[in-house]
Image (cartoon, coloured by chain):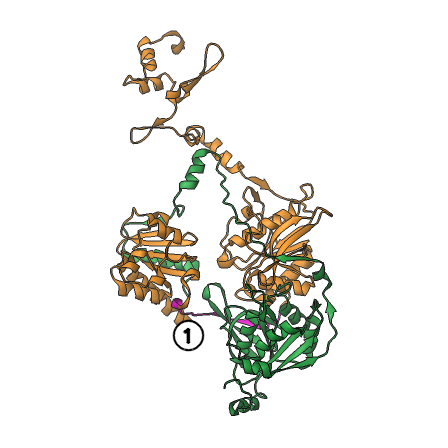
Chain colours: A green, B orange
Amino acid sequence: MPHDTNSPTSARKQAHISEQPSVAVLISLGRHPLTGRARRADQDARAVEMALSLGDAQPRLLHAGQLDQDSEAALRAYLGMGFDALELIEQEQGADVIAALSDRLRETAPQLVLTGARAETGEGSGLLPYLLADALGWPIVAGLASIERIEQGEATLLQALPRGQRRRLRVRLPAIVTVDSSAPAARQSAFGPARRGVFEPVAHASVQDAAFAEWRVQPARKRPKRLKIIKATSARDRFKAAAAKAEGGGGQILADVTPEQGAEAIFRLLQEEGVLR
Amino acid sequence: MKDDLRRDPRKEWIARNRLHPDHQRVLAELGRGAASAEWLGPNGLTRRDPHAVGFIGPSGLKRIDRSGTQQAATASDTRQRGAAVDARKWIDIETPAFVVAVVPDMSAGRLSSQDRDVLGLARRLADADPQRPGAVLAVLFGEHKEDSLGEAGIDRLLHLDDDAFAGYTPEARLAALLAVERQWAPRYWLLPDSALGGADLGRRLAARLGERPATGVWQLNADAGNGGWQCLARGAAGTSDIQRPLPRVVLALAECAEPVYEARHAARPVELAQKLPETLSRIRDMGAVAVDPAGVSLAEAEFILSAGNGVKNWEGYHRAAEVLQATKGASRVAVDDGFMPRDRQVGATGTWVTARVYVAVGISGAIQHLQGIQSCDKVVAINSDGGCDMVKRADLAVLGDASQILEALVALVEQYRQQQQESRDAA
């Protein structure tokens, strides 16, 4: 029973909290891309998973938004990952949650705030962590793959780059880090802990997002495919463009060279392109 | 004078007789070669000899080239070259009405296709009013390998090539962008919405400027009502479209606009008026981490060493891939023969790869395989056959025995690694 808070292992975990940095995870409501049902947001769930993998510290969950039947089921899915409580700042429908979240974070002052890169509902611009970081004056790192260690007020992080590459960063705490789909997948949500978990309400006035209400939102249209533009002026050029095989455009051919010379040329090209690490 | 007075009836007869063996020579002698295909008849009508067009090709067959290149080649060379240069309009905006700032990603030191699209979008915004054109200011960080930046539509070029901007330095870059904001006050800020490039920097900039940016913009429409702009942006993880007025900071997706083709812009270098203040960075870049190249999916691998039928020494190939830290790929033949697993196949039936550097060892280049490597930047071929299609496609082709060349390459790279290690130890 890994998620049972009454087991002795959990009690041991509780004892270590004072040495560990406090971690908060901002969670949001997800939306299933096919059925449109409310669910736990994929990237936020990955952030929760990463917070749980940090070791002994029990992260706190923080959500700002409306609580109704749909959203309650989705939020309980986070509780089912092994939590007994979730802080809920209740806000009205269509509210801007930045003030609420930044005030709450300033109050509780966690060392590390984890969250998904962008929401699955609403505007989903991925701007919230940046605005929070700007409001709190904390550094922010995006696109995390894993957290290697946290010591002496600094976190060593692995950032996921395109093409499967990784970069090591060291960030002064407190900091906000965001997680996208290159982070490890989230664990399953267990039904029992999800039912048993409780919402801890936190009061904060809600501010309406006036600008968003004015915009027109519609289901995503399929983007038109870009047409291949042929700029040929004569029939012969058009035919050549249509029938041409892929050409390298004046590639260099080294014939009658020793293997060493050939290897030298390849080595130089690899170095120029910067693929040799 | 000679031509006027003395006629040679025999030569004239040969010139009229197309079947005569000396016909071509005599035509040339009379100065009526290809030019005689068209002349003014006695009644003022243009007469045309359909048999006189074209030329005899190398195989002895008559060839008609309607593209005009053949004629142009015989015409004066200077005129030809002048025409090629003039084909694209040269645009140099002296006093721009406003500035549109673009921060391209410049991944690997080159403009990506998304960068070009965003520059195209910037041109649409800048050129909306032909009487009062704006200038597109590009801010480049670090070294670049691009030599034709003006052709992408850049009027002003701010190149910040400082050690402070090397690696992942979002805080220093943000400070530089804020200095640009103070100096030029751009009407729009455009950045590509690409992971860890413009997406990160653009959101930082928007948060600092206090602007609410439009993210995931993929279409720009002129607003009929007030002469402004409306944009269409993806929202909610790509499941909805948001139509809204265009804000000052725009993060645009790929193919948001057509890149610039027909014009060359000046790309005048500009400088920041004030020196950038020293920023205290709270994020330190510790450098790239070696990842297991076998764990990277073939479709997104950056550097692929691909093997084909020409590879005889498979152990040498695997060792080379290990030393080079390249992802392994294979042609269909190598897979069918059981030397490589099926999931490593590159080509139409296998994976379409997007590598920046693709090294093909002993692959002749079937059309299906060449389709699979269409979007690779640099292709290197190691092959024994100089006439194969892969050699034609390759940017660098080395002809010779593949196993020997790989061995030599492995030796070079090992030596290079050792030197690097030594210099690191010394430091």
Query: In the rendered image of this protein, does residue A147 appear above or below residue B405?
Result: below
Q: Quadrant of the C terminus of chain A?
A: bottom left
Visible residue check, residue B220: yes
Give the residue displayed 60% in from the left and 42% down from the top: B91
Q: Nearer the viewer, residue A198 or A182?
A: A198
In which quarter of the view is residue B376 placed?
bottom left
Give the residue displayed 42% in from the left and 60% down from the top: B299
Query: In the rendered image of this protein, does residue B339 appear above or below residue A234?
Result: below
Q: What chain letter is assigned to the residue under label 1?
A: B
Q: Which residue is mark 1?
A: B425
Visible residue check, residue B268: no
Q: Position of residue B82 (x, y in %)?
A: 50, 34
Q: Position of residue B402 (x, y in %)?
A: 28, 57
Q: Position of residue B398 (x, y in %)?
A: 31, 53
Count of marks overlaid on the render: 1
The answer to whether residue B290 is magenta is yes
Give the residue displayed 71% in from the left and 68% down from the top: A95
Query: In the rendered image of this protein, does residue B34 appear above or below residue A238?
Result: above
The answer to whether residue B232 is magenta is no
Query: In the rendered image of this protein, does residue B15 appear above or below residue B282?
Result: above
Which residue appears farthest toward the left when viewing the image? B312
The local crowd at label 1, few if under 14, some if 14 to 19, many if 20 or more residues have their Cα within 10 Å, is: few
Q: Position of residue B229 (x, y in %)?
A: 68, 50
In which quarter of the view is residue A31 placed?
bottom right
Amino acid under disc 1? Asp
Please indicate whether residue B304 sits to the left or right of residue B248 in the image. Answer: left
Which residues are the magenta region?
B279-294
Q: Nearer the viewer, residue B44 or B140?
A: B44
Q: Nearer the viewer, residue A88 or A196?
A: A196
In which quarter of the view is residue A198 placed?
bottom right
